[in-house]
Image (tube, rainbow, N blue to C red):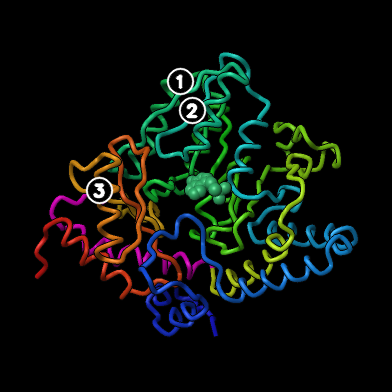
Amino acid sequence: MLQSDGDTIACATNKAYWDAVRALYVVTPEVVNLENGYWGVMAEPVRREFIRQINMINYENTYYARLHSGKDFESVRTKVAEAVGAAVGEIALTRGATEALQLLIDGYNKLKPDDTVLYADLDYDSMQYAMNALELRRGVEVVKFDVPEPASRQSILDAYASALEANPKTRLLLLTHVSNRTGLVMPIAEIVRMAKAKRIDTIVDAAHSWGQLDFKVGELGADFVGFNLHKWIGAPPGIGFLYIRKDRLGDIDRDMGDADFPETDIRSRVHTGTVNFATVLTVPVALALHDKIGAAAKQARLRYLRDYWVHRVRAFKNIEILTPDEAGLYGAITSFRLAGKTSKADNDAIVAELRDRHKVLTVRRAGVAKGQCIRVTPALYTREADLDPLVDALAVVTGTKVA
Ligand SMILES: Cc1ncc(COP(=O)(O)O)c(C=O)c1O
């Protein structure tokens, strides 16, 4: 049923195809949910598999866990590695991108006192905090700079080039593939190349990108990457993984709580303890559905849905669209703010008005240098008609008369 026709542009607007995808999801009719950036709702086949696995693990209990879970978890790890284009020895499962990235940032052992570590305003809060913690833990200087707004591919590259130029002792750079604040897609491969030329390592936060965008890990060029499976791959909440390129394993310390695996095994870099077995065991069904819908088709559809509302509101009075239209710089997510409305209170009020008066759910985002904003994130189940209430509501809140 869900066979992509191979032409992704035609596929993005193929009503029968996306109606069939939509039919895989059961979501509340209470609100038009355009806050799908938190995590991804499970499609029905995934939800059913999750419930089946919960029932299995509760029934089989430690009889299953002691005898079979090791082999099954290895099979999950292998499937994830294949899907992201890595060797299985380069992947370790985690409870999400947060766990993955904190282990990478804290475990990175090449820093010396007086080195500099660098990140930008659009990076995720808790990764910024983890980078800040390196000041005390490793004695390094922590430098933060701002990504330009509005951004273009060239202005982003120039901003990173200037930041590296201005901080010649930089040893480690944090990068975020898709910003959770604005949805801006960073030209990661180019920035990684620029950093490598200066012998600077990069840790890439791909929490939001894989599954929203169609790529394999090798295309990023980065040696250390943290991923989620519960956002755009649609696995149950509580699962992600880290990637360490094979020849770089020694540059990330083993988890202080692990003595189970040899130093040469990436699984020694993560020691989670007892995990949600059902969540892990559901990953293959989520990956299979991702594959069936098609990574390229997903990317094209999500960009199309984003364009659908952005192109209609861009000319509205007083609206600033923070995420550029330039090809390759956006996916599903785009943020906006009303001119001059940069505070928490301003944006909370607009989010509340959209939700309570217009039944459209969005979310306020802070941390952007030029001021707070509102993030809009459609999902695969979103229809064009679901975006019309957002467009109408934005006409009202901006005081724009639509012909
Ligand atoms: C860019 C980015 N990094 C990291 C995370 C953390 O992901 P999680 O909470 O799923 O571990 C998020 C979550 O929204 C994110 O958007």
Q: Which residue is mark 1?
A: 167
Chain-order first, disc 3 or disc 2: 2
SS type, badge 2: strand
Q: Amino acid at mark 1?
A: Asn
Q: Which label was assigned to residue 337?
A: 3
Residue 206 visible in the picture: no
Kindly report the distance in space between the C-alpha atoms of the residues bearing marks 1 and 2.
8 Å
Q: Of tags 1 and 3, which is closer to the observer?
A: 3
* Residue pointed to by mark 2: 118
Residue type at the position of mark 2: Leu
Circle 3 or circle 2, nearest the eye: 3
| Residue 136 lies in the magenta stretch | no
Q: Position of residue 169 (x, y in %)?
A: 52, 18
Residue 86 drawn at (x, y percent): 68, 53
Q: Nearer the viewer, residue 122 or 245?
A: 122
The answer for how far apart the CA atoms under marks 3 and 2 are is 27 Å
Rendered view: 200 above or below 169: below
Is 334 drawn above or below residue 265 in the view shown? below
From what the image shows, is residue 65 above or below residue 170?
below
**Mark 1: few/some/many CA within 10 Å (<14, 14-19, 20+):** some
**72 above or below 350?**
below
Q: Which residues are magenta?
A: 295-321
Q: Are marks 1 and 2 in contact (CB under 8 Å)?
A: yes
Foreground pick, 110 / 29:
29
Outermost residue, top side: 114
